[in-house]
Each structure stands twice: as structure tokens, then as C-alpha cells.
Image (spheres, rainbow, N blue to C red):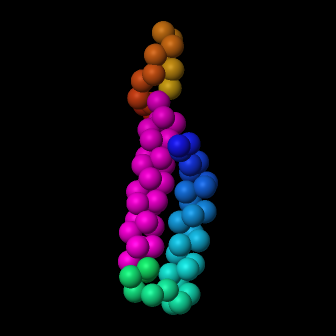
């Protein structure tokens, strides 16, 4: 199974939030949707954290990644 992109996960999360905010969801279904939303939020958060870590690294003269140090 192909992994979803950040944008796909975010769109799915937003759709769930809109559905829950509508107030037209039975309690059991709302609990399922909330659980799914929390999993999607974690996936999105992890992807943002990983992207931030990658951006904060630069290549040194030996083409090795190292932490970026602002001077």
C-alpha cells in the first residue's frame, strides 16, 4: 500500500474535523473519527518534524550532512 503524502493526510484530517464539527455524527462514529484524526495528526506532525530536521542540516565540504550552526 502506497504511503499518503503530507497534503493527502492533512486534507483527510481537515475533512474529519469538519464532519465532527457539524455535530451530525453518532457518538460511536465520532469516537472512531476522533481516533483516526489523532493518528493523522501524529503522522503530519512527524513529517513536519523530520522536514525541519532536514532543513536544519547543511552539506559540509566533504558532502556530509551536519547540523546548521548560525554564527
Q: In this view, does 21 lie to the left or right of 30?
A: right
Inspect the magenta stretch and tell me whether residue 60 lies in it. Answer: no
Q: Is residue 34 above or below residue 40?
A: below
Q: Is residue 38 above or below residue 63?
A: below
Residue situated in front as seen by the camera: 34 or 42: 34
Q: Residue at x 42, y 49 (%)?
A: 46
Residue situated in front as seen by the camera: 65 or 48: 48
Q: Residue at x 47, y 30 (%)?
A: 57
Residue 69 seen in render: yes
Q: Residue at x 58, y 48 (%)?
A: 5
The location of residue 33, given as percent across then percent down, is 45, 73
Q: What is the total number of numbered labels drawn onto the structure image?
A: 0
The location of residue 1, given as percent across then percent down, is 53, 43
Residue 52 seen in render: no
Q: Is residue 43 above or below residue 14?
A: above
Inspect the magenta stretch and tell me whether residue 35 lies in it. Answer: yes
Chain part drawn in magenta: 31-57
Residue situated in front as seen by the camera: 19 or 27: 27
Q: Which residue is drawn at 40% across and 73% down?
A: 32
The prevailing secondary structure element of the residues shown in magenta is helix
Q: Is residue 18 left or right of residue 33?
A: right
Choose top left, top right, bottom left or bottom right for residue 71: top left
Residue situated in front as seen by the camera: 29 or 44: 29
The location of residue 45, given as percent across then percent down, is 44, 54
Q: In this view, does 43 lie above or below 35?
A: above
The location of residue 60, given as percent across then percent down, is 48, 17
Residue lying furthest bottom: 23
Choose top left, top right, bottom left or bottom right for residue 38: bottom left
Amino acid at each position: 500500500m502506497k504511503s499518503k503524502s503530507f497534503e493527502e493526510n492533512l486534507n483527510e484530517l481537515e475533512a474529519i474535523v469538519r464532519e465532527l464539527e457539524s455535530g451530525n455524527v453518532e457518538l460511536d462514529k465520532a469516537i472512531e473519527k476522533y481516533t483516526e484524526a489523532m493518528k493523522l495528526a501524529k503522522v503530519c506532525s512527524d513529517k513536519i518534524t523530520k522536514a525541519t530536521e532536514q532543513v536544519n542540516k547543511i552539506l559540509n565540504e566533504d558532502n556530509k550532512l551536519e547540523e546548521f550552526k548560525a554564527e
